[in-house]
Image (spheres, rainbow, N blue to C red):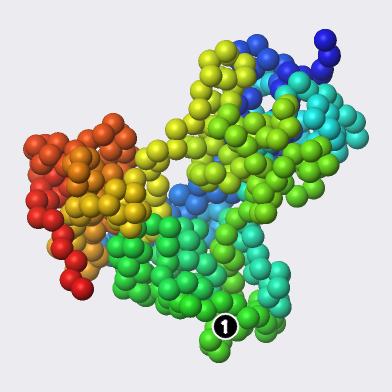
């Protein structure tokens, strides 16, 4: 029987890798974990968590204005970008420490170095200049921002990685992209006081969400003063000196800014890991190809999280990591269930979504019933804010099951998390109708919609 240094060696200490490693160690496995940046991964260090802090910060300016409608007066509020960065960094340091302690307390050994797969059971620790062996290897290196390097001057822009550490807050921002990262950062920069232009190659933003969500968010971006340019891409970025940039678009437009932000997508972080040399099959975008048990084409190599490009969300990576550990080290076979995963976009206003879009539902179920409402929330009646809230329910007509719920509006993500439980459990529209409303709330609209929406062609 072969003798290895570890039962499991994990490359990448993000959400999925940490969960898998902690559980495996608790179940008695000898676990090693290599992380070349900081323990916690994209979500904790340079993704969801610091992004949400920025979202909160961007909302306070609007709140100060709205408070006047409710009788509050105060001096002119002032915003300090350096203070926000300092406080954010302190909290990230605290969370990083917690992740490290949790791994160590579970019995895992952490290696702060880049790791490369040499063969199905050998990992090379670059910083230590030595090899370690493992019965099983788990790849959980996540994803990384992609930049179109064919664009002249592409290096003059930043990605989400650098945006969390800007030395000064920009006055004028041009954002490339139309997905959730682009939309969220456009709203963040606008909310903190910058002029923002968002440039997207498609016809409408958030194309992977329900079309009504795309239209509603697009309208809300424009309403708050964000310029949205669609069906255009960057042709070049020019350095004007002293931090000034000029972006040349494919439609002939020129945009001046002091910050250019790339948010055109992310790709699995597998470059230079040695996976192909070890026999691990990768997809065209570098994703590790895995089966339903997260096993790669090599018997001893597994992968979870964004590096597999299945569903690129932190909670999914955590569940995939847990299922892997249960299956491989606790004799409790589990698979990740990808049905009815809730999603959010922390824009202004935010988006919450679970289940099928209307178009997806029509393709899958044929006949569907759609219920929609569009209104100003009660909170805004005294503030003068014209922000709208959209709620949409998609129902399989044959079974009456609710197969999709989509919300654009304040607290939409919070509502969707609760609704996802019911939708995943098979709730019907009749169940919604039989539920007594909670008044006065925005959420009561979800149980009072009775008239089917009929599109006008």
**Camera sees residue 379:** no
Q: Residue at x 53, y 15 (%)?
A: 332
Name the element at disc 1.
Answer: strand
Number of residue marks: 1
Query: Which one is nearer the viewer's eye here, 167 or 229?
Result: 229
Specify whether 170 is left or right of 30: left
- Judged from this view, the residue extending furthest toward the bottom is 252
Say if 352 sits above or below 315 in the image: below
Quarter of the image for the C terminus: give it: bottom left
Specify whether 384 is left or right of 359: left
**Camera sees residue 426:** yes
Query: Which one is nearer the viewer's eye here, 265 or 368?
Result: 368
Q: Quadrant of residue 342?
A: top left
Specify whether 403 is left or right of 301: left
Q: Position of residue 398 (x, y in %)?
A: 20, 43
Specify whether 283 is left or right of 381: right
Q: Residue at x 20, y 40 (%)?
A: 399
Q: Residue at x 45, y 76 (%)?
A: 230
Q: Quadrant of residue 32?
A: top right
Q: Position of residue 234 (x, y in %)?
A: 60, 77
Q: Position of residue 415 (x, y in %)?
A: 28, 43
Query: Which one is nearer the viewer's eye here, 324 or 236?
Result: 324
Q: Residue at x 51, y 23 (%)?
A: 334
Q: Position of residue 347 (x, y in %)?
A: 39, 58
Question: Which residue has dot 1 on it?
Answer: 249
- Judged from this view, the residue extending furthest toward the right is 129
Q: Quadrant of residue 349?
A: bottom left
Say if 205 sits above or below 392 in the image: below
Q: Residues within 10 Å of mark 1 (few under 14, many from 20)?
A: some
Quarter of the image for the N terminus: give it: top right
């Amino acid at each position: 029987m072969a003798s290895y240094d570890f039962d499991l060696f994990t490359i990448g200490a993000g959400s999925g890798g940490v969960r898998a490693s902690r559980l495996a160690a608790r179940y008695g496995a000898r676990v090693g974990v290599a992380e070349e940046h900081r323990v916690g991964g994209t979500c904790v260090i340079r993704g969801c968590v610091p992004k949400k802090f920025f979202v909160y910060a961007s909302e306070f300016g609007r709140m100060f204005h709205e408070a006047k409608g409710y009788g509050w007066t105060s001096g002119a509020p002032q915003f300090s970008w350096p203070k926000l960065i300092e406080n954010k960094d302190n909290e990230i340091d605290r969370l990083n420490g917690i992740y490290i302690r949790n791994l160590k307390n579970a019995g895992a050994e952490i290696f702060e170095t880049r790791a490369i797969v040499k063969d199905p059971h050998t990992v090379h620790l670059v910083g230590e200049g030595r090899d370690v062996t493992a019965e099983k290897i788990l790849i959980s290196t996540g994803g990384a921002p992609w930049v179109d390097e064919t664009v002249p001057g592409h290096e003059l822009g930043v990605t989400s990685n650098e945006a969390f550490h800007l030395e000064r807050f920009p006055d004028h921002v041009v954002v490339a992209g139309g997905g959730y990262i682009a939309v969220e950062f456009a709203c963040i920069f606008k909310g903190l006081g910058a002029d923002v232009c968002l440039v997207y190659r498609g016809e409408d933003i958030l194309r992977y969400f329900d079309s009504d969500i795309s239209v509603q968010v697009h309208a809300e971006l424009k309403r708050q003063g964000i310029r949205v340019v669609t069906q255009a891409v960057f042709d070049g970025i020019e350095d004007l000196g002293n931090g000034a940039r000029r972006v040349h678009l494919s439609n002939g437009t020129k945009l001046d800014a002091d910050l250019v932000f790339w948010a055109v997508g992310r790709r699995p972080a597998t470059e230079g890991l040695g996976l192909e040399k070890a026999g691990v099959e990768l997809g065209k975008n570098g994703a590790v190809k895995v089966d339903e048990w997260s096993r790669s084409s090599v018997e001893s190599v597994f992968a979870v999280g964004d590096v597999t490009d299945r569903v690129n969300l932190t909670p999914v990576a955590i569940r995939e990591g847990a299922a892997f550990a249960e299956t491989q080290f606790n004799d409790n076979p589990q698979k990740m269930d990808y049905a009815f995963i809730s999603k959010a976009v922390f824009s202004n206003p935010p988006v919450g979504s679970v289940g099928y879009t209307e178009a997806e539902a029509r393709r899958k179920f044929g006949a569907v019933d759609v219920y929609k409402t569009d209104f100003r929330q009660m909170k805004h009646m005294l503030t003068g804010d014209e922000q709208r809230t959209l709620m949409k329910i998609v129902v399989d007509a044959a079974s009456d099951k609710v197969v999709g719920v989509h919300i654009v509006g304040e607290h939409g993500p919070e509502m969707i998390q609760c609704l996802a439980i019911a939708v995943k459990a098979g709730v019907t529209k009749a169940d919604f109708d039989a539920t007594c409303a909670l008044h006065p709330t925005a959420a009561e609209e979800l149980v009072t919609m009775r008239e089917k929406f009929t599109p006008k062609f």
